[in-house]
Image (cartoon, grey):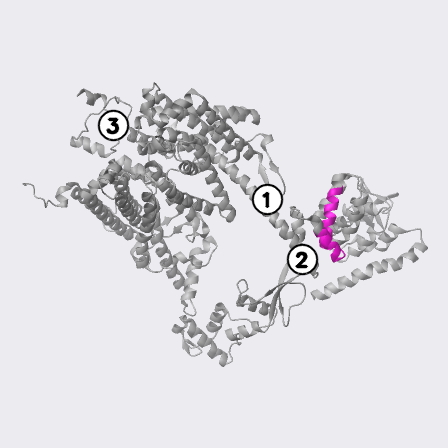
Amino acid sequence: MTQPMTQGFLSKNPSVLIFLGLLALFTLTVTVLSNAYGLDLVSTSMVKTLGKTLCLCLIALAMDLVWGYMGILSLGHFAFFGLGGYMIGMWLMVARSRDIVLASANGLPMTPQELNDAIAAQIFGVVGASEMPAIWALAGSLPAQLALVVLVPGLLALGFGWLAFRSRVTGVYLSILTQAMTLALALYLYQNDSGLRGNNGLSGLQNIPGLDWAGQDRLSVWFLWASALALGLGYLACAFTVSGKFGSVMRAIRDDEARVRFLGYPVEGYKLFVFTLTALIAAVAGALYYPQAGIINPAEVAPIASIYLAVWVAIGGRGRLWGAVIGAAFVSIVSTWFTGGRAPDLPLGFYTVKWVDWWQVLLGLSFVLVTLFAPKGLSGLVDGLAGLRPPQRRGAALGPDEGALLEKEARE
Amino acid sequence: MRSLLLALVASLALALPAAAQDAAPPVAAASVQTGLAAVIAQNAAAIAKPSRQSIGPVIAALGQAGTGAPAFLQAWADKKLGARKADGAIFRVTKTADGYALADPATGADRGTAAKAEIAEIKPNAGVRGMIASALIQFQLSDPDPKQRLAALTTLARDGAAEHLAPLAASIEIETDPAIKAQKERLAGLLTIRFGATPVARVAAIEGFGADLGLDFRAALNPILASARRVFDAAPSGNVAAILTPGKPGFPEAEAYDLLVDQGLAPKRLSPADLRAALEAHLENGAVGGVPLADLSDPAQRETAYAALEAAGKVPAAATSAEVTAAVAAHRFADVYAEPDPTVTAAAKAALQSVSLKVGAMQGADLTLDALSLASIYFLAAIGLAITFGVMRVINMAHGEFITMGAYTGYVVQQFISDYTISIAVALPLAFAVTFAAGVAMERLVIRHLARRPLETLLATFGISIALQQLFKNIFGTQARPLTAPEWLDGAWVMNDIVAISYIRIAIFALACLFLGLFLVVMKRTRLGVEVRAVTQNPSMAASMGINPDRITMLTFGLGSGIAGIAGVAIGLFAKVTSELGADYIVQSFMTVVVGGVGNIWGTLAGATLVGGLQKGIEALNPANTLAAQTWMILFIIIFIQFRPRGIIALRGRAAGD
């Protein structure tokens, strides 16, 4: 045994160090260029956009874990992302409303009941209610609500996953079912009497209670740091999960679930664990995202958002963690550029292509092309630069069944 | 003040007819004026300046004044009367170029002309005109013109009163038109229920209706059963609906006490807001009643402070909870009917009960129709999806966009063919052709290259879906486009006041049945059907038998997409045609396929029925909230999949594949 068995996790996965290094460099660069702590070359809104992008990268990481490594195409992970955002948003709204109410109070000091009623009226005036719904019982306490950020999505994922995996719903069925889950959640949140302000969602989340003195320019940088930290830790956790024996079993389940089951592994347990873990990562990403976005409403949880998540991961490259991060960052930043009206129009003589209108078409078609011709997505480019090439298994199949020899293979 | 006014009006109302009758004989003796003319002459001043409060008796007198009265009242209501300024005499007036042509108010005979300045036109206000119209009804009821009679009945149905009952009953006898007669009899019954002279007559009228479903019957019964909460010192009296015990569910002690406060039988309880205001008013040196201000965030401390103020006589005494309990215990509470006669309320209650039973049954029937209609829409939308999923095991996420494409095809056809019937007849096959072509193109260009990678197919078709959706937006704009149904599909098939279904929905139901039949014939009776079934079950074996699986998958995909296009035309007829039309139905279509089970048309049918029925059923339980209905339906389906992961009708054995 010349190879030592105790080879470290990081030396086995050099890409983790490279990724963390690049992330740290990025964060440092943005900080130095930022308005609050440096040269004032990057605007506060740009810092926020970058911070939000980091959160999206984190949920893309979760999606890659569950889809790229585990083969579960979940079309519902934005439900967990949104729930995380709602949970932190509840605390932000209550704490901020309490500050507003106390600032405008006069006369007798308020009883707890009066204070509660005033906060409720402040928050729920828009939906014509004035009572604090039961689900807001813990919203006054930051630690409790932080716990709910992981508990609520975690329990939802655990319950849903347990039901779905136990009855061996797989493949396309499972995708549709996860989509139904997030649709049900979105429809529930749309109701005014759901207790979460219905269509209005939660707003004013960018104002962090107690940190008014810091100003948005500094807050945005802090959130960028927090998002980068979460992304780094999430990357470490995901890399650790997929690197060892556990990761091998995950990939085996993706490639042939039945064989893994026959080998004696508890496939359902693995699936449930990974599904719930990724839901937790998604929830944390959501809890960091929405204070930067400032508003959350039920449209964020709509099925389309989760499908876009799959698009990011597919374009970036499934089955490698950094691929998902590249995909999310690339597509969301390019999308902001195109839809923000900053891309120059493309005159074709007979018709001028306005990218605000045509970006979606471009995205959809390029997605089809990526799926067809570059299943590895953008990360395939990196492979090409590194000189890695897949074996040439081209040509028509010799038989109609799956796994039949292809022409070129047969010749060799 | 107000009671004084009322008394005045009442005495006036009593006095006026009496005055008219007393005064009539001498006037008649003195001149040739009799009947109507006399009444008009006596009340000229009141007629010239009618006020709603006092004109009632005058109108009543006029109504009973005999021949010519209807014409006079009509002219009055139409503002065609005038008063001569010199002596106040009333005439019917017609405007001419340089004044008025006058006519006798009672007979209509010509009475010469008058200059414009001599006559003041009489313009009764809307309230008075309403009273006049009500008096006119008795004449209109026996008017020779059936339209007039029907108009009178409509007015009566809206606001009939006790005095109309007798004329209405009298006019039934002489009615010749059977339809109007039936309507009159019904109306007479309804009026008897409300205003009948004796309880026996009213009970008989109620029972005469049986379990009639008409809304008007229920509307007549409901006011009889209206009750009010009342407080009694001793045992409740009157027509008692229910004795209420404070503290029982539905009648909390607080409500009982509020009732006492409303009646002035008990002092008001101190609300938290009042308490706060009272304490703030007596804030002295940072303390209230000896309690420091900072401590007043505690409710108990606030009570203490108020008690201290009360002891000092600075604030009025407030009822304590012991006093509240004692006051409530000292009184009895009951719901009392406004209707005094118990036999009438009992009959009304029984009638309403049997009606509501029947209404419930009818509502169930209506719900079933609604559910069937929704199910047929889901069936149409899902059948194409089920075919492609069944044969190729791929989910076509762009299916919704094919539905939209069909609807837009219909819209474009209507731009060229203005006759709606022909345009729909053209649009249906054209939509099929367009989406069939689109489906075949998609299969050849994309899906074929992703064979046996179902998840990637799902994503690739999703990419096509977002591209198509945006493309529709760029071409047709974001606003809704009209797809108009032909006129003969407008309206609804109405069975009674409860059960009704629009013709469009019936047409869609028929279309769904047609496609079910067509599908069955194609699958069971044609060469293509055999080949499709063979490829569904085992592609490699089918290929060995000389069937070209590629061709079959292409054709089935085209067929499924084509049906989506037709579904699009059908849905577009009643929904708004926007680029999101298909997306609104796509998840329900997925549900239908998943619940029903793949590879079997009956499964899709069962799935559509279940999803549609479930959605309507849950909506019926909570009609105000369709969003909640959808949420619950999806939850139910997620649970349902636990027990039947392969759908209601699952393929067994080798056909099930994996």
Q: Which residue is mark 2?
A: B346
Q: Which residues are magenta?
A: B181-206
Q: Quadrant of the N terminus of chain B?
A: bottom right
Q: Quadrant of the C terminus of chain B?
A: top left
Quadrant in which residue B645 is drawn:
top left
Contact (Cβ within 8 Å) of mark 1 with mark 2: no
Q: What percent of the width, then of the height, locates residue A401?
A: 28, 26
Query: What amino acid type is highlighted by mark number 2?
Result: Ala
Among the 4 quarters of the image, the one containing residue B539: top left
Q: Chain of mark 2?
A: B
The picture quadrant where one finds residue B500 is: top right
Which secondary structure lies at badge 2?
helix
Q: Which residue is mark 1?
A: B362
Q: Is disc 1 in the same subunit as disc 3?
A: no
The residue most toward the left is: A2
Checking the image for residue B24, the label placed there is none
SS at circle 3: loop
Magenta stretch: residue B187 in it? yes
The residue located at (43%, 34%) in the rendering is: B603
Is residue B228 found left or right of A19 in the rendered image? right
Q: Residue at x 23, y 51 (%)?
A: A37
The kind of secondary structure the magenta stretch mainly shows is helix
* Residue in view at x 78 percent, y 48 percent: B169
Asked which secondary structure carries label 1, the reply is helix
The answer for how far apart the CA atoms under marks 3 and 2 are is 80 Å
The answer for how far apart the CA atoms under marks 1 and 2 are is 24 Å
Q: Which residue carries the number 3 mark?
A: A403
Q: Earlier in the sequence, mark 1 or mark 2?
A: 2
- Residue B55 seen in the figure: no
Amino acid at dot 1:
Met
Magenta-span inclusion, residue B267: no
* Horizontal side, residue A154 vs residue B181: left or right: left
